[in-house]
Image (cartoon, grey):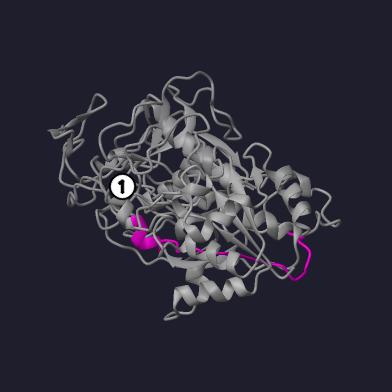
């Protein structure tokens, strides 16, 4: 057999089509999964390319979900009763050329009666089909392949039966045998940037369901990057700094989004602030030495594009539902915000299921260690900070801005009064009044952006009044179900609140004031 053509409708079965193509690739010879935007040359007639693809195939699988007959999607794709519909053309062409056509009924779907099918597809109602269950995905795919005469699991892969359907885009199991079968997928997919931008503006975005690796996922491929970090003196004047380097890998997400993860080297640091640090609070002590193993941390707070990619590709909740577009300040490359700790935790769980990696929120000690990047000063840039280096309120007061259309501007935050928009001997600055994209300001010496200001970031830990019982290994404090730790400050807060050692806390289901709280993910590999 030289080829399998998977016919599906985006609004009905795109996620299952992608998962099936990956599963087929495991059992057949050398596979190539073609998406039309990737495999069809620019300027080529899509219809002609579709027919050419069918000519090289010996079987067509018609994936039929609950909305197969009439699932017109947001891209304006035609329904099956329209002669110009691609699904109708694919199946009609295969039937006309006597290519075996197998209806594959997905969970919740039934075979449409003959009188509901267009004339050229009525023969489909008499074709022997196959039911593909979501709960028995792996065994059902094996049985379908055997009945199609395509082959069995590779003998070199004794763990083959452990692969299950759920998330991972464009992933292929390692150790797949080489051969001649090619799996074709057709249907246009959205170009990531435009689609995410449209989605962020309130539109619908059909991210494909992707696949979870039940076996150990591939070790990420690290690349070395070089960059310019920043440093200032006590009055905020820039200092010369040597080039810094970091090891990074990119986690590919659905829709073309990518999540850059920076390797944070293991080491020892002094956690908390010394008694003489300006604007210090009692809950920042006592200072104590913490020793951490290496871990990975997101290069920036999770963006709205990344959030939407994960939520739309894994719409089933693990513990709670998620809004794909929760942010107050809309923009694909802006940080996602206005989410609660519980929602942030749910996001990490779904990301872990999609990738097979141990994604989670960072512990409080990991966050501070990564923020400091070797600095013992109040900020990772030095003894003060400027609004050229971070997004915070540099015009004065404790907090600025609005929430729900009402002013929340105040000189007092958490019982402490703040006057100037400057920290210590540094300069006053500006107030942007909104979030900014990652990369607007220089990274710290570990290669991390926006550790000070922009949006607060959740930590895994439950809140504690101080560090009197802190772990020397940096283990998260998970005792109780009370308030959770926030770090880093936001665009609306005084620079003193954005210091490396500053600690705040919030109830796990409270998203806070509009546009101010987001998250950054950690990963242990």
Question: Where is residue 309 drawn, in percent x and y?
Answer: 44, 50
Residue matched to label 1: 454
Q: Is residue 225 left or right of residue 418?
A: right
Which of 509 and 154 lies nearest the eye of the viewer? 154
Task: Name above or below for residue 356 compared with residue 506.
Answer: below
The number of numbered badges drawn on the structure is 1
Question: Where is residue 514 drawn, in percent x and y?
Answer: 25, 36
Q: Is residue 238 left or right of residue 120?
A: left
Which of 319 and 480 lies nearest the eye of the viewer? 319
Which of 131 and 187 lies nearest the eye of the viewer? 131
* Magenta portion: prevailing SS class: loop
Task: Name above or below for residue 514 compared with residue 112.
Answer: above
Q: Secondary structure at mark 1?
A: loop
Residue 185 is a magenta residue: yes
Which of 41 and 400 lies nearest the eye of the viewer? 41
Q: Is residue 114 left or right of residue 145?
A: left
Residue 79 is a magenta residue: no
Task: Name the outermost residue toward the right.
Answer: 155
Whether residue 174 is visible to the viewer of this picture, yes or no, is: yes
Task: Name above or below for residue 187 compared with residue 42.
Answer: above
**Dot 1 crowding, Cα within 10 Å, few <14, some 14–19, many 20+:** many
Question: Where is residue 509 drawn, in percent x and y?
Answer: 38, 26
Question: The magenta stretch spans which residues?
Answer: 174-196
């Amino acid at each position: 057999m030289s080829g399998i053509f998977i016919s599906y409708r985006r609004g009905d079965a795109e996620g299952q089509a992608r998962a099936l193509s990956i599963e087929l690739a495991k059992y057949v010879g050398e596979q190539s999964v073609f998406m039309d935007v990737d495999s069809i040359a620019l300027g080529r007639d899509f219809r002609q390319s579709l027919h050419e693809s069918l000519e090289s195939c010996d079987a067509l699988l018609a994936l039929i979900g609950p909305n197969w007959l009439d699932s017109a999607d947001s891209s304006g794709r035609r329904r099956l009763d329209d002669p110009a519909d691609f699904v109708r053309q694919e199946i009609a062409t295969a039937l006309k050329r006597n290519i075996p056509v197998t209806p594959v009924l997905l969970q919740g779907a039934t075979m449409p009666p003959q009188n509901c099918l267009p004339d050229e597809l009525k023969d489909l109602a008499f074709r022997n089909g196959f039911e593909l269950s979501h709960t028995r995905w792996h065994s059902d795919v094996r049985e379908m392949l055997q009945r199609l005469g395509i082959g069995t699991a590779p003998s070199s892969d004794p763990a083959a039966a452990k692969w299950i359907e759920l998330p991972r885009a464009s992933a292929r199991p390692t150790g797949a045998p080489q051969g001649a079968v090619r799996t074709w997928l057709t249907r246009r997919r959205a170009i990531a940037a435009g689609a995410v931008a449209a989605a962020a503006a309130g539109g619908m975005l059909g991210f494909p369901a992707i696949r979870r690796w039940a076996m150990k996922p591939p070790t990420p491929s690290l690349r070395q990057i070089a960059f310019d970090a920043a440093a200032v003196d006590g009055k905020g004047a820039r200092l010369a700094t040597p080039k810094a380097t970091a090891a990074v890998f990119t986690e590919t997400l659905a829709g073309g989004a990518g999540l850059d993860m920076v390797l944070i080297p293991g080491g020892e640091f002094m956690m908390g602030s010394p008694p003489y640090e300006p604007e210090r609070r009692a809950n920042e002590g006592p200072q104590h030495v913490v020793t951490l193993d290496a871990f990975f941390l997101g290069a920036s707070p999770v963006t709205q594009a990344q959030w939407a990619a994960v939520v739309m590709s894994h719409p089933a909740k693990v513990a709670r539902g998620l809004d794909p577009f929760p942010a107050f300040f809309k923009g694909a490359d802006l940080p996602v915000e206005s989410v609660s700790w519980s929602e942030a935790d749910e996001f990490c769980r779904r990301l872990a299921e999609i990738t097979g990696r141990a994604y989670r929120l960072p512990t409080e000690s990991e966050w501070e260690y990564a923020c400091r990047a070797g600095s013992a000063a109040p900020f990772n840039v030095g003894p003060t900070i400027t609004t050229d280096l971070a997004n915070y309120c540099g015009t004065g007061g404790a907090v600025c801005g609005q929430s729900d259309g009402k002013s929340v501007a105040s000189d007092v935050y958490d019982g402490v009064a703040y006057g100037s928009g400057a920290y210590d001997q540094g300069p006053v600055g500006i107030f942007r009044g909104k979030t900014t994209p990652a990369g607007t300001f220089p990274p710290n010496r570990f290669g991390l952006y926006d550790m000070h200001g922009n949006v607060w970031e959740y930590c895994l830990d439950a809140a504690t009044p101080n560090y009197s019982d802190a772990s020397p290994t940096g283990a998260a404090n998970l005792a109780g179900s009370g308030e959770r730790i926030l770090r880093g400050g936001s665009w609306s807060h005084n620079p003193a609140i954005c210091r490396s050692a500053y600690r705040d806390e919030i109830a796990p289901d409270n998203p806070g004031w509009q546009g101010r709280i987001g998250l950054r993910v950690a990963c242990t590999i």
